[in-house]
Amino acid sequence: MAGAVVEESLRLLDGRQPVGAGVGLPAPVDPLHRLGLERTVLAHWDLQRLQDVMEARLDCPVLLENDARSMAVGEVREPLESLVAVKVSTGVGSGIIVRGALVRGAHGAAGDIGHVRIPEAAGRRCRCGRDGCLAAAASGRALLAEPDLAGYGTLRRLVDACGSDPAVRSAVTEAGRVLGRALAATVGTLNPGRIAVGGLVGVLPDFLAACRQQILDDAFEPSLVDLEVVSADSRTATAVGLCKLVEESLYAPERVEQLLAQRAG
């Protein structure tokens, strides 16, 4: 997989030399690569080796970051904005920005709301191996697991059928409500000014409308003042966010000092 990504990157670069590169991953990313990924969609990936291989082939520093967190960075409009970006596709993840600063947490797992246990998912097995996770009730994988919807086979086909199949529309709407209930607690905890929802499932009008209404119904009124719950272009925002994060890492004071010391030595 890493080889294919590198080859496509080199093709797009067309002989140009990058100064840095970023990779958005659908799983918690520990900056020190100490955490195992066995319970995620990246089971048994060796992040350190992935980074080393890409840096060697691209001949530049490579930053690994969670895709939803990268999306959150790309969604920032104002320097001191507070927002939560949520990506609902195969799984569910989020990125948190507080007054312009990205929240990663102690070990890179901040925003991993997909694996918070909720009553609505009781008895449903999540990809992580546990029962009752939010992702087991409100993700693309969860929708495809519904007996009436399994025939669609792929998430793309299911999403495309949302406007014509009442069963898909009903399931998508309920998934939006479930996510909204979970996000109401996030709104009460963080008091963001905006929630941006993206991903194949997240941008569906029925999903977003149900999610928004549930947040308005459940969250404490003071935390709802001027709150926007809007659709997001997760692909564009993630790419923009990764570019910003790569730039920050390249010109971080400690990195500049290290380079200066190397040249002086």
Image (spheres, rainbow, N blue to C red):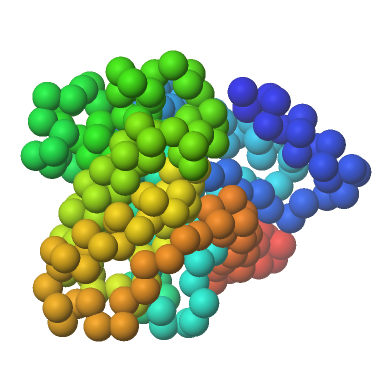
Give 229 or 192, whichever is nearer the viewer: 229
Residue at x 66%, y 35% (from the top left corner): 54
**Residue 122, placed above or below residue 203:** above
Residue 165, percent across and down? 44, 33
Q: Is residue 186 left or right of residue 52?
A: left
Residue at x 26%, y 43% (from the top left corner): 174
Residue 85, percent across and down? 40, 59
**Residue 246, placed above or below residue 164:** below
- Please indicate, yes or no, whether residue 192 appears anywhere in the rendered image: yes
**Residue 142, placed above or below residue 189:** above
**Residue 196, placed above or below residue 23:** below
- Please indicate, yes or no, whether residue 110 appears anywhere in the rendered image: no
Residue 67, percent across and down? 48, 47
Residue at x 41%, y 82% (from the top left corner): 80
Residue 260, percent across and down? 66, 67
Give 3 or 89, whichever is nearer the viewer: 89
Residue at x 82%, y 42% (from the top left corner): 12
Q: Is residue 246 left or right of residue 98?
A: right
Q: Is residue 255 left or right of residue 128?
A: right
Quarter of the figure that contains the N terminus: top right
